[in-house]
Amino acid sequence: MQQRRTSASLFFATLLALTLLGCNGAERQKRELAAAAQRQLSSLVSRCRSQQPAVQRQLQELRRSSSELVNLKQQPYSPLRRPAAPDPELMARFTREDQELEQERYEQALAAWRSSDRAERRYWQGEQEAKRQRSAFRQQQAEKALLALGVRQHNCGSQRLESVRSPATCRGRAPLKSVGSDSSMVERSPRRSRRPQRRELCCPAHPEQRIEGNGRKYFLHLLTSEQLKARGMADKRAKLVIQAYPVLVLSNEWLEELFCPICGGNRWCHITKHDRVEHTVRWAPRELWEQVAHVDPVVANPTVSEFTRREARRLNQKRADGKRVFDAG
């Protein structure tokens, strides 16, 4: 009997020791899992805080390009001013020959207006398409950057962006708001930049590529009222302007040599200035050089003789020994 009691007590002691060991192992495993979860959460918090400024910038760029596309779709074409029809009361005072002459002038002005309006509409459509392509390119770049940062896009009626990580994980930072048609991108608006913006000149062949020039400009000169009417000015006012200024110099249109890295060379462009930043760039046709004070950089000056041009280039010529012509040694 005493032996049975001893063996039973040993059995219960062993069972109790195994139970305690199992409890300690489970608690240790729970502590390790909790520590791993805390480390993962800390890494997510630090990653979210480091990427949040970049996400905000890309969200602002995405919203700006989207609003530009919406504005381009809503912007209507403004036709040129139609020439006024002859006044019937005034025509009644004219003779028959004068009435026919006035009617013929009106029909010619109407035909010229239709031709100019068609050309202006085609030019406006081309400009709108170029702006649309630039805005769409910037929108695609912003979306790619957001996807690279771990932001996915959902299209459910209105466009909305959600972060893969919860904004609540970024403790101490303001959470990002969803992008919608009326809501703001971020909780705090970016600081307004006081630095003057540079002019935007894009290559006509590559709308996404910005081009630069050396700053030398050849402003256009207008000599006839038809050239002013082609730019949207009324007939009567155009005649008055040409009478007051027989040679009218345009301050918002000029020719400038610009360099495009993709094209790999300099080309002369016809630039139209709309405001301090936005400009329209087109390849300059050869006919426009007739309106730039009779200057053509391709053709040499006819008033300069061949001997003078050859002697002017003599400083850059070299002798047979490799030295320049006017070297002392």
Image (spheres, rainbow, N blue to C red):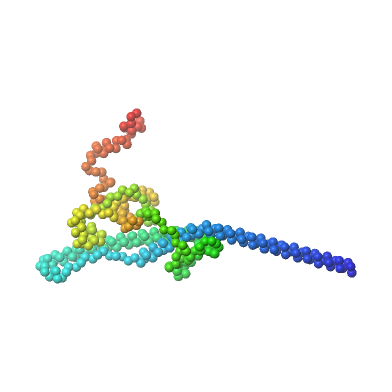
* Total numbered badges shown on the rendered structure: 0
What is the quadrant of the N terminus in the image? bottom right
Q: Nearer the viewer, residue 159 or 242?
A: 242
Evaluate whether residue 30 shows in this view.
yes
Where 74 sits versus 309, above or below? Answer: below
Instruction: Examine the image and state in which quarter residue 232 appears.
Output: bottom left
The quarter holding residue 223 reads bottom left
Residue extending furthest toward the right: 1
Identify which residue, 194 or 295, lies in the foreground. 194
| Extreme residue in the top direction | 329
The residue shown at (24%, 37%) is 307
Residue found farthest to the left: 95
Which residue is drawn at the image coordinates 31% and 61% (left, top)? 124
**Residue at 34 percent of width and 65 percent of height:** 75
- Where 26 falls versus 203 (above or below)? below
**x, y percent for residue 93:** 11, 69
Question: Residue at image x 58%, y 59%?
Answer: 42
Res 319 seen here: no
| Quadrant position of the C terminus in the picture | top left
Q: Position of residue 239 (x, y in %)?
A: 19, 59
Residue 61: x %, y % from top left: 43, 60
